[in-house]
Amino acid sequence: MVKSVLFGILFLFVSIGKAQSFVATVDNNKVAENDRFELRFTFEGKNLNSLQKFNPPSLKEFRVLSGPNQSTSMQIINGVSSSSLTLSYILLPNITGAYTIGSASIQYEDKTFSTDPIKITVVKGSQKPKDESSSQVSNKEIAKNLFIHATIDKNKVYLGEQVTITYKLYTRLNIAAQMSVDKLPQYQGFWTEELETARNITFGREVIDGQQYSVGLLKRAALFPNQTGKLEVTPFELTIPIQVQKKKNPNNVWDDFFGDPFGRSEVVEYQAKSNTLRLDVIPLPENNKPASFRGAVGKYDFDATIDKQKTKTNEPITLKFNISGSGNIKLLELPPFELPNGFEKYDPKIDEQINRSGKINGTKKAEYLLIPRIAGSREIPAIEFSYFDPENKSYHTIKSKSFNVTIEQGQGTGNDLANQQNINQLESDIRYIKTNYDDIEKQGEVLLLKPVFWVASITPLLAALVLIGWKRKQDKLSGNQQLLRYSKAEKVARKRFKNAKKLLDQNNVELFYSEISQALFGYLEDKFHIPKSEFTLDKVADELTKRNISADLVDKMKTNAQKCEFIRFAPSTNPAQAMNEMYNAFSAVVIDIERSIT
Amino acid sequence: MKRDIFKIILLMIFISLSIAKADVKSVMQKGNDFYKNNQYQLAIDEYDKLIKQGYEGTSLYYNLGNAHYRLGKVGYAILYYEKALRLSPNDEDVKNNLALAKLNIKDKVETLPPFFIFNIWERLLASLSVSGWTVFVYFCFILLLLCVILYFFSRTSTQQRVSFFSGVGVFAVLILVIILLAVKMNKEFNIKDGIIVSNLVTVKSSPDNSSKDEFVIHEGLKVRLEDKVDNWVKIRLADGKLGWISEENFGQI
């Protein structure tokens, strides 16, 4: 038990102790002069993501062939993960001697780790150096006969003006094989365009200080400075294998026999380095700078065209820009232009053609698709393009002509609606305050609860009632009685019949006949507007036939009426039965007449 | 003698009314001048004077809303625009500025789009204010009376028929408008909406500062007032969330 606890503690301790480490190692502490060796900084820890600020030691005594190269690895053993990050350099010593590689540091979770310094001893090489010494060809000697010379055509340029840099190889030695590039020049602060050079280097001849060199063009580039001040171009480094004449070693008798039997030469790899170039970049003059200037430097021609002058709404027009000339075509900014209202502009289609021999020149074409949304006649204002000519140190502005476009109403109103929406959205600020404030009143009761409202509503109601009452009274008095009678005739007749029925039941003969004849005649008088004084049965018959009432019914009415008159004054033997018959006959007549006239 | 007294009373009423009007005008003028000079706080102070005296009006609320908007107090701006809109629901300027101010609301409360018939009903209701609907009812009433009178005064049966049917039509409209007015008044007096005027409000689960936090809302949000206890108000969001906030964070429309 105790043992296992102890073991656990120990294990814990060990694992804590191994939590993070940062060490520097070299694969060999003792290296030969021309032997490359590897320097490694290894960090082990859990969370490699929190590593920060790796600070390498100074390595200026060595040539860094490559590095820092980064590699990471991760391991999980018994559920415990560990990862490591390795930063390695491949170094080549320059001169013999003892060196110390200083300590490197790295930050991990707010702690800084640093490595111990490493001692390196560089000894005379065993193989190659011996060879070199035997051939007794020193780098110095080679440098005299082989070098790369970088030149620029101008030392003082304007911002954005082209500088051509040329790398030339001067040699008096034979180049044995393909050269390999160690380090390309760095053009910091420039936009670079490689200029075309021949694939194979062709050598010409040139005399420098009385010595004849073969000269080959290695590389040419056009540089466009994009910052002002003093700029530097780092050297171009090449490894060139060269054939060197072997020198006889007088101590070696066998040399003559066992040395190189053919050319008596050997191949030496020589690191050639061009000179560092410096140049001065001056800013463009501020005075007379046109408003439309967008940084174009060089010499240009500008032209703008549109494909049609007449179009319909929603049918596109193409606006073409054509800029040609020499200068940094690629970074050339298109001239801005203003569009009249109702046009929609799409991103331009840009086409560039660049000629990369000597001075960079070419053309840049841009095509804008413009879609008119609103009909009418519009003018696209003239488009200005400005550039700075470094040769005569002045700004130039080229102005295109302005374009008049006539837009007719086309089809497709759906798009117009969308446009409308856009216009609505454009209103981005609140509207101005109201300056008419007659509407401000004391906060009062609701209109509905105000007595004024009720007075105002009841008064017209009362007025209307009074008016209607008065009207009806007037109607009764005036000739409209006829109408009233007409509409009431049936009602009156019915009332009389009802009365008659009652009399019938009471067996009141005289009154019954009077009532029943009143019912019929009154009905006929009212219905046909016959004044009582003019009332005769014949007249009624006339009126009835005038109104297309069947002759049958007219007859029936006539006979019944006559019968009634007769019975009234000459009562029959069986009055009850006669009364009943009369009642039925009369009511039937009235009902029939009423039916046939309505 | 009696007539003279009546005249004098009328004159006095008229004078006092015109004095009040003149006072309103001068205060509004002052407020608008401050607004013109970009002194929005001073303009608000002027307009508030009128509010304190119990005045109301679309232009007053609208100008107050504008001044608050200029000061960046979106909550108050929306509150006053809503108040203005309640008085005149069809005012273009108010609608426009309210829509703009509402763009600044930070909270997005999800609400289901209402069924289209309810939507039409709501829009119909919102198209006029209470007094607007009252006037409409009155107008229909008078029209109905005219129809009845015409009916009784008509000489021919065609006239009678026309007046009868138009009377029936007007009566139907009158009934509908009365219903609308009743619903509108119910809404106006029983349902109370408010706007959050404080920049950020933590909504509590009960009317007590030490109670649990429910959610957080920002200024400009429209909420419904459900209950009131001391100086706490119970609010309901459009999506149904409930909670209590302190009264000063809330402005009733």
Image (cartoon, coloured by chain):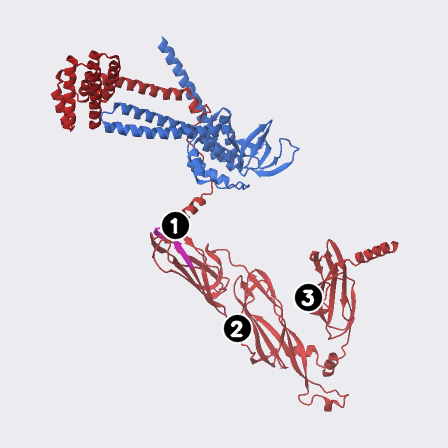
Chain colours: A red, B blue
Give the residue type that dot 2 points to.
Glu
The magenta segment is A368-378
Query: Which mark identifies residue A196?
Result: 2
Report x, y in % for residue A307. 36, 60
The residue pinned by badge 1 equals A414
Q: Is residue A500 above or below residue A379?
A: above
SS of the residue at dot 3? strand
Report x, y in % for residue A457. 37, 22
Give the residue type that dot 3 points to.
Asn
Whether residues under marks 3 and 1 lie with C-beta atoms below 8 angstroms apart, the answer is: no
The residue pinned by badge 3 equals A69
- Share a chain, discs 3 and 1? yes
Location of the C terminus of chain A (image quadrant): top left
Q: Is residue A66 above or below residue A556?
A: below
Disc 1/disc 2 C-alpha distance (Å): 54 Å
Whether residues under marks 3 and 2 lie with C-beta atoms below 8 angstroms apart, the answer is: no
Give the residue type that dot 1 points to.
Gly
Is residue A62 found inside the magenta-colored segment of the image? no
